[in-house]
């Protein structure tokens, strides 16, 4: 009893030796949480339908949350007055002078109004498309940095409602959209009712433009294109100040949000987006390994 029998050629049943006892096949390997995590953290080629859906839903969600934050007008004006006094104390309160100087040149300020209303979206989407087509291995990590930057900005809008300079009382700031009747801006005029007017801190115009500029500078091959990448956030800073939509310290807040976004990307992928391989297939090369994955075993056939 308990022994396995075998039938020899002579037809008699004999007890099989212990070392010939049948052994059941090992269970099929299952995907462990560690393997799943490594798979999620491995850059792969993005899928166009997923990216379009993700970006569309994410921006819609961002807009809904941003505009759903209670418009605490009294608190926003109080915070703006305090921030303005802080900048004056620090000797960096140049926004009013820039606002008046640029407003005196009609064609320039009108151009900046359109810049503020449009390029914020157009350039960011353009850089995402360029990454998708030319740097698919870096796309997901760069997109994560942008999304994390935007996500933490929503926390700032909720915790620190802040009026833009153009809405402050007892100051000389000029609302350039109203004065020059510029079309398209959601910051002033009729469209202001569909946008939260007290979400100036941090400035996502700076957060997004700096993300675009660093991405282009790090990955573009043509020198003058790389220079344009660096100039883009500088031009954006000039625009947000000249149109009285942000304080200089709002820009600092946007930079800090972007630093957070890059930190999240560094923790998740083990490297900044620009240090990952251009093509996702190169991640599996012998010299590349995603953070958190086990080391490759040595090849016994290697010389």
Image: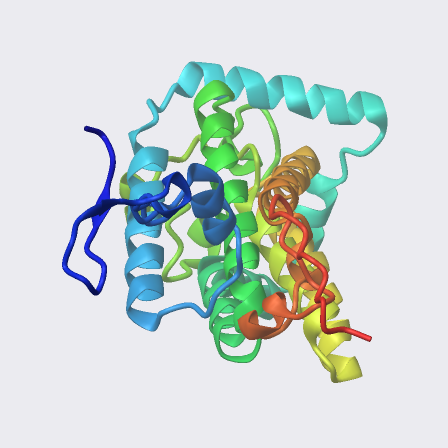
Which colouring convention does the figure follow?
A: rainbow
Relative to 169, residue 165 above or below: below
- From this view, report whether residue 199 is shown above or below residue 37: above
| Image-quadrant location for residue 285 | bottom right
Q: Is residue 236 visible?
A: no
Residue 75 rendering spot, x and y as whole percentages:
47, 15
**Image quarter for residue 21?**
top left
Q: Position of residue 269 (x, y in %)?
A: 60, 49
Residue furthest left in the image:
11
Task: Give 253 or 261, whichever is nearer the viewer.
Answer: 261
Name which residue lies at 74% across and 82% down. 221
Q: Is residue 80 above or below residue 252?
A: above
Residue 116 in the image, given as x and y percentages of width and height: 51, 57
For the view shown, which residue lies furthest in the right direction? 91
**Image check: 136 left or right of 14?**
right
Q: Number of labelled discs? A: 0
Placement of the N terminus among the 4 image quadrants: top left
x and y, in percent, of residue 129 in the image? 47, 73
Is 273 on the left-hand or right-hand side of 166? right
Q: Is residue 108 visible?
A: yes
Q: Residue sitting at 51 percent across and 35 percent down?
A: 153
The residue at the point 51 percent across, 21 percent down is 160
Q: Is residue 116 left or right of residue 255?
A: left
Residue extending farthest bottom = 222
Q: Quadrant of the C terminus?
A: bottom right
**Quarter of the image where one finds residue 106:** bottom right
206 lies left or right of 222: left
């Amino acid at each position: 009893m308990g022994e396995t029998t075998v039938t020899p050629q002579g037809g008699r049943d004999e007890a099989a030796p212990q070392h010939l006892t049948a052994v059941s096949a090992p269970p099929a390997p299952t995907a462990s949480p560690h393997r799943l995590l490594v798979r999620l953290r491995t850059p792969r080629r993005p899928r166009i339908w997923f990216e379009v859906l993700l970006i569309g839903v994410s921006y819609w969600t961002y807009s809904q949350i941003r505009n759903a934050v209670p418009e605490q007008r009294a608190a926003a004006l109080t915070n703006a007055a305090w921030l303005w006094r802080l900048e004056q104390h620090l000797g960096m309160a140049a926004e009013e002078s820039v606002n008046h100087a640029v407003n005196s040149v009609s064609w320039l300020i009108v151009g900046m109004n359109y810049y503020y209303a449009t390029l914020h979206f157009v350039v960011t989407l353009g850089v995402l498309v360029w990454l998708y087509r030319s740097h698919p291995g870096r796309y997901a990590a760069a997109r994560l940095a942008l999304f994390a930057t935007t996500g933490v900005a929503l926390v700032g809008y909720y915790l620190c409602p802040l009026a833009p300079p153009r809405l402050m009382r007892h100051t000389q700031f000029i609302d350039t959209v109203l004065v020059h009747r510029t079309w398209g801006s959601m910051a002033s005029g009729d469209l202001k009712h569909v946008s939260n007017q007290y979400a100036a801190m941090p400035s996502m115009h700076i957060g997004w433009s700096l993300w675009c500029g660093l991405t282009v500078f790090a990955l573009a091959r043509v020198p003058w294109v790389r220079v344009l990448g660096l100039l883009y956030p500088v031009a954006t800073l000039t625009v947000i100040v000249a149109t009285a939509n942000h304080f200089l310290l709002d820009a600092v807040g946007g930079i800090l949000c972007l630093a957070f976004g890059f930190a999240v990307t560094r923790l998740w992928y083990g490297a900044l987006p620009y240090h990952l391989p251009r093509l996702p297939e190169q991640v599996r090369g012998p010299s590349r390994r995603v953070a958190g994955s086990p080391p490759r075993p040595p090849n016994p056939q290697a010389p």
